[in-house]
Each structure stands twice: as structure tokens, then as C-alpha cells.
Image (tube, helix red, strand yellow):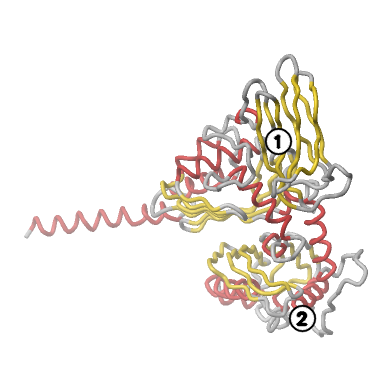
Amino acid sequence: MKKTVLAALMFAALIVLLVPTLATAEGGERGWLYRDRLEIGRALIEVQSTNWPEIIPYYTHDIEYHDAIVDIYGIETMTAFFARMFANSPNLVTTIEDETLIGGTYTASWTMAGDFAGVPYEAKGVSIIKFRGWTRKVYYQRDYYTEGDIMASIPGLDEAIWGFRTYYRCAVDPTFDCPLAGTARYSAPELSVSTDSASPDDEAEARGRGLRWLRRRRMEIGRSLVEINADNWQSLLQYYAPDIEYHDPIVDIYGFETMVEFLGRLYASSPNLVTTVEDETLLGGIYMATWTMTGDFDGVPFSAKGMSVVKFGRWSTRVKYSRDYYTEGDIMINIPGLDEAVQGFRVFYRCAVDPTFDCPLEGQALAGLDGDQSRSDVLPSVGGFKLEQNVPNPFNPVTEIAFQVPSGGAEMSLRIYDVSGRLVRTLVDGYEPSGARSVSWDGTNDTGEKVASGMYTYRLTSPSFTESRKMLLLK
């Protein structure tokens, strides 16, 4: 009997000691697991070309990763993806702006700047990282950003992305001086809504009801504002602060009156837009949610995934800041004329970084798993000749083709063919001295006429060497 009582007392003492430790480890601000997960999440977002191999051990063997274009499954594929990405973006720097960690989910918004395949760009985005169980291992990561921020710096693709952004702003942005004559500009209905009166849940009521009540109300309001639609947007205006600030990949809105007109125009152009929250978190006054969005924009059907960040005022149920992250490529890809630009860029991007992608661009250079090979290192070289991939690719209106001629020079030709094999243009035909050479193509045939958008093959030929590569012309 004494032994039984003693054993029970020892077990009870162990539980008393262990429970606070587990609670602290899981989510307490001073817990070691909380601190480690915060540091790991931050490291995975701010990873650079100089240290990416160091963060690979933090991923599980079955890691699942997604961004606007690429879907990665498994640690080996993830390693190859990182190697290729940083080979193409050696100076990429990501800086975290806001971050949260709730249980096993780390979320951060960030800015990113650098080059992709030699093209400088800047982008804003947000990431979600999920840890497995009681570990420091990450099994899921998703980055939300728009590829339009990269496309906007690429000649040929920049026209497509800026054209769409201009059209979108003409339709919904009340502050935009639309340069497109005849473009539909939707007007918000006349409303007698004001934020001068007290909110239904003012600060005094929130303090009186307590933090638990405030948390529930913020969750409800945050979810409602993300799932806002044409039928209820007017009734939800009361939850925006007078100085509301809103951003998406295209539009920046400041102030309540401008927000009202923006929403009025948005739902006039997208009356059947439906957004459905998938996952959501609330930390303090910051609500975050991932979602899927389907509907039409000005008659064009689309489906997109995204994420929203909603910030409440202190002890308030009013929102002072909101940002939506999604890629406008998901809308553009359904618009004839713009779809080719988006598809072309996505093919080019996947050729560069996705190890699972069967690249249709023949000769597209890809980095090795160690991430140390440059583009020229992996290009084939036979008999002293070398044919480089054209830059930029896809292109519009001009691209540059570089090639290497062996010592002593050589008789050679460089010709362009369409998809049916017909000769389009002869760029080089005759003797070329040794060394690095290059020639440009402006998208015209041998008679000076502009050729159509599409895939073309260019072929370098000499008595001892022949090699071909593909390139994509977009208009």
C-alpha cells in the first residue's frame, strides 16, 4: 500500500513539473520551441544564395512547397529547386516586415529585391510555414506574391503586365487618371455611410467585455471582410476606420471615402466574385487568412489563391490596414492576348527553377544541385563552338543570340526557323573570326516583315558542328 501511494505521489509530482514545461515549449513566449520556430521561420524566408544549404535540414523529407508558379514535393526536389533558384538569383535579398507564430504556423510578410536571370525586380509577398508536431521540422511552405512584379522588368512582358494593370486601375481605382479612352469606369452607388459615428463595438465596450470577446469579434469581422461580396459589402463598411489603408498587387487605397468607391467599382465589375477562407489566424490585432477566389472580372472568368492581412486598431473592431496578396497572372491567363505573356513567362520560370518540369525550350540552361554552376557552365560545347540561349527569352521585340567561334575562325551559318521547319531569317552566313560573338534578332523575316508570336528555332551550323535552341516570341 505504501509503495502504491508513493508511486502515485511521484507520478503527480512529475505531472506538476511537466505540464508547465510542455505548455511553455509549445507556445509560451519564453519557450525554447517557440523561440526556435521563430528563428527557423525567419531563416527560411530570408534565405540567400550564400547560405541556402544550411536551411535544408529544417525541412521534412516530404516537404510540400508552393508559390505562384511552382509546386514542389519532397526534400530532393526542394534542394534542386533552391539550387536552381539561387543560381538564377544570386543577389536575391528578402526582408521580413511583419511576422506571427501561433502554435506550429509561422506567417510573415516581406519585401524581396534582386535579379532573376539578370532582370532586376522588386516584389512584396507573404509566406506561411507549418511545423510538424512538437518539432522544428517544416513540412509545408507557401509563398504568395505576383509574378507580375518580375514580368514588369522584362522587355516584351512589361507591356502585357502594365497594360493589364492600367486596365484594372481604370475600372476600379477612383484615384487613377485613366489614359484609356472609352474604358468602362464603374461608379459606386450613392451611400449615406460615415465612420464619424461610434462603431457598433467601441473601445469602452471592448474593454468591458474583455480580450476573449474582442478576439471572437475580430475573427468574425476579419473573416467577413476577406469573404466580402457584392451582396454584403455595404453593410461591412462600418468596420473600416476613417484612415483605412488598403493594398493589393495593383491598387493602393487611402481613406474611407476612397475605399467605399473602390469597393463599389470592384463589385460592379465583379458582381459574382466569391472568396472562401481556408485557414485563418489571429494574433493580437492582426488577422491573417488564406483563401480561394472565383468569379469574373469585367466578364472574364478566373480562379485564384491568395492571402490577406487585416490589422485592427487598439482595443477596436475597426480595421485600419488591409493587404491582399495574389497573382494577377491568374486573371490575365484567361484574357486573349495577355494569356500568351503569362504562359510564356511561367514556362520560362519553370524551365529555370523547376526540376520536375519537362522544359519545351530546347537548350534552356539549368543550374545543378550544388547551385554553383552558372548558365555558361552548363551550356554544351563541342569542337570549340558554343551556342548560348537567347536573352531575353521569351522576348519582344528584340533578343540577343551569343555564340563562341573556335580558334582560327570558321565558315558558319546562324538561321531561324518556324515550328514547321521553314526558314524565317538568316542572321549569319559566311566566315566568322574566333572568339565570343553575338547577333540580335528583331522578330522580322528575310524580307523585313514582322513574324507572328510563337516558338522559333535558331540553328548554328558549320562543317564540324551543328546545334539548335528554341526561343519564344511574344507580342
Q: Please name the residue shown 67% across and 69% down the image.
A: 302
Is residue 112 depicted above or below 334 in this figure? above
Report x, y in % for residue 54.
Answer: 50, 35
Badge 2 crowding class, 10 Å Cα cut-off, few under 14, some 14 to 19, many 20 or more, is few
- Tell me: 120 left or right of 16: right
Badge 1 crowding class, 10 Å Cα cut-off, few under 14, some 14 to 19, many 20 or more, is some
Picture disc at residue 249 = none
- Tell me: 69 left or right of 428: left
- Tell me: 273 left or right of 356: right
Residue 9 visible at all: yes
Foreground pick, 289 / 5? 289
Picture disc at residue 459 = 1
Dividing the picture into quadrants, the one containing residue 213 is bottom right
Is residue 398 depicted above or below 19 in this figure? above
Point out the frontmost of discs 1 and 2: 1
Q: CA distance from mark 1 to mark 2?
A: 72 Å
- Pointer 2 residue: 197
